[in-house]
Amino acid sequence: MAQRIIIDTDPGQDDAVAILLALASPEELEVLGITAVAGNVPLALTERNARIVCELAGRPDIKVFAGCDKPLSRALVTAEHVHGSTGLDGPVLPAPTMPLQSRNGVDFIIDTLRQEPEGTVTLCPLGPLTNIAAAFQRAPDIVGRVKQIVLMGGAYFEVGNITPAAEFNIYVDPEAADIVFHSGVPLTVMPLDVTHKALVTKPRNDAFRALGTPVGEAVAEMTDFFERFDRDKYGWDGAPLHDPCVTAWLLAPDLFTGRFINVEIETVSELTRGMTVADWWGVTDRPKNATYIGDLDSDGFFALLTDRLARL
Ligand code: BDR
Ligand code: CA
């Protein structure tokens, strides 16, 4: 039976690829809904981009909801310097015609977890954790009903991308991350330590383009745009596909390796705001709360991704 998932996202080119991978895999993943959150760009753009991506995948039937337009208790920080002014710069894609759902995304998360059998719904956050934390705060009864959370966020060996100490998704809303990491829900975390190994080199991007489909072309153009930032910053030969690690893990967990460890979130210091203090080496006796992924079979990951995108 397909795993039932809610994708919580701030598209974002890499979010878009993560969504496409899920929608290309209906036998394994049933997308109950997509909830947009403010992150890479403001909410009005992330919910729009989520709908653009669903239509690109030929799935205008997917329900897209708008959630929180800012972090729980801080001003929004965005990342147009990485993703462009639309958040989805690169390909020219048509304006969406499918509707935005009228219900708020946080309410959708709460209602879905209350309606579905306990322990059957997986949450897949690909952006700041605001929507998930807001749902847990507003409806504590749903926390124990979540099967698991598989999220992109944090860094230990790679330290940070938005500041020297913090990864973007956790930095934007550290209070939300703190709530999620202390929720007791089984967590699988895709930090920069693994996503920086999921690099779209030129041959890998050529393989997307060679699919000869609108999806293959769009993904190649998104990656062409997105790689500017990492090429300039890290000198890499391609862009890291952060968020698709989440949906790929659901499809093929054997491609990934990690450790079950304690991870705490820095919320007090401004200097290290949003740092994920990951006890990779087991030097504390703090309770373990996350399966923290450190490595992946990158060739296997790109083979899976390319094969699935070809189905759209
Ligand atoms: C994360 O931040 C965003 O820019 C990406 O979409 C990804 O979710 C990487 O730090
Ligand atoms: Ca994202």
Image (spheres, helix red, strand yellow):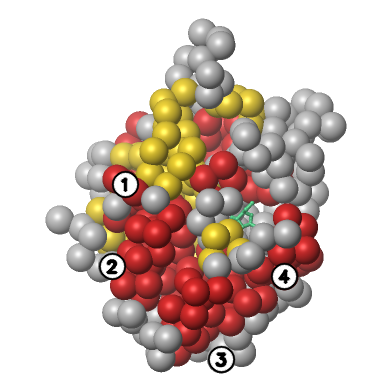
The amino acid type of the residue labelled 1 equals: Pro
Q: Amino acid at mark 3?
A: Pro
Can residue 123 be seen at all in this image of the molecule? Answer: no
Taking the image as shown, residue 168 lies to the left or right of residue 182, namely: right
- The secondary element bearing badge 4 is classed as helix
Quadrant in which the N terminus is drawn? bottom left
Helix or strand or loop: what does disc 3 sit on? loop
Name the amino acid type tagged 4: Arg
Disc ID at residue 253: 1
Sequence-earlier tag: 1 or 2? 2
Q: Quadrant of the C terminus?
A: bottom left
> Of the residues tagged 1 and 3, which is closer to the observer?
1
Disc 4 within 8 angstroms of ligand 1 (CB): no
Residue 117: % across, % down: 22, 44
Question: Which amino acid type is shown beneath numbered disc 2?
Answer: Ser
Of the residues under marks 4 and 1, which one precedes in the sequence? Answer: 4
Which dot, 2 or 4, sits closer to the camera? 4
Instruction: Locate residue 14, reporting x and y percent.
Output: 55, 65
**Dot 4 crowding, Cα within 10 Å, few <14, some 14–19, many 20+:** some
Q: On residue 228, which mark appears?
A: 4
What residue did someone put label 3 on?
94
